[in-house]
Image (tube, rainbow, N blue to C red):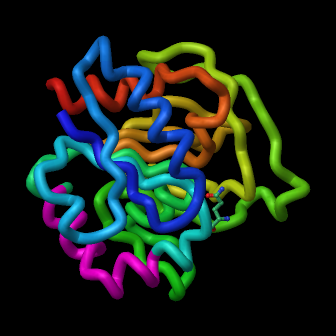
Amino acid sequence: MKIGVLNIQGDVSEHFQMIMHLHKKYNVDPVNVKTIENLHGLSGLIIPGGESTVIYKILKKSGMYEKIYEMAVSGMPVMGTCAGAILISRDTGDNRVNGMNLIDITIKRNAYGRQINSFIQSINIEDIGNFNAVFIRAPGIESPGNSMIMATVNGSPVIVRENNILAMTFHPELTGDNRIHEYFVSMIDN
Ligand code: GLN
């Protein structure tokens, strides 16, 4: 199975590594997604963190925005982390980034403040367990809508799932713990 990692900008290589580590167990291979052609034949897609306004512009310009939407609506699992969660949300409250509305969340960019307000927190994730979550200029999920809340920080959801779509406001690729990636791969299997 091919799992795409959107490679426009942001922390792409760490997600790539995570999927490579799961190769033996699940027969998954990461694919660098830079163009619309690279989306062809994927079983799942990871949209990494970075700067959502920049990623949004390039997704739109290349036609990948519409193509990803189409594939996700047809059932392809998508995991959005941090900026990636902003891009797949229903409402970003920021007219420079229109969410794809793949998951029914409203999200606020930079909800915890600036880079200096980044933090690491241990969270307890439904079906996964305790996880050290790295928040970097993280967005905040203001309303989970119809999505299932899998963990919260101070009462606010930080990882949510709706059917084939998984969104989190932190960076699961930075701690060397690949259980969230493994969970995502299991969404493809099922
Ligand atoms: N603050 C960034 C944005 O709004 C997201 C930060 C991140 O992905 N680490 O796009």
Q: How many marks?
A: 0
Q: Residue at x 72, y 61 (%)?
A: 111
Q: Residue at x 24, y 64 (%)?
A: 68
Q: Which residues are magenta?
A: 56-71
Please determine whether, in this image, residue 52 is positioned above or below residue 60: above
Q: Quadrant of residue 116?
A: bottom right
> Can you name the residue that lies furthest to the right here?
116
* Residue 163 visible in rendering: no
Residue 101 image point, x, y percent: 32, 66
Residue 186 image point, x, y percent: 27, 23
Residue 70 image point, x, y percent: 14, 65
Q: Quadrant of residue 23?
A: top left
Q: Quadrant of residue 175?
A: top right
* Drawn side of residue 174 relative to residue 186, left or right: right
> Which quarter is ligand 1 in?
bottom right
Please determine whether, in this image, residue 189 is positioned above or below residue 64: above
* Drawn side of residue 124 relative to residue 22, left or right: right
Front in this rendered view, residue 127 or 156:
127
* Residue 187 visible in rendering: yes
Front in this rendered view, residue 157 or 70:
70
Front in this rendered view, residue 145 or 114:
114
Report if residue 67 lies within the magenta region.
yes
* Drawn side of residue 57 relative to residue 31, left or right: right
Report if residue 157 lies within the magenta region.
no
Q: Residue at x 44, y 46 (%)?
A: 167
Please determine whether, in this image, residue 172 is positioned above or below residue 37: above
Secondary structure, magenta segment, majority class: helix
Query: Which quadrant is the N terminus positioned in?
Result: top left
Front in this rendered view, residue 60 or 126:
60
Q: Residue at x 76, y 30 (%)?
A: 121
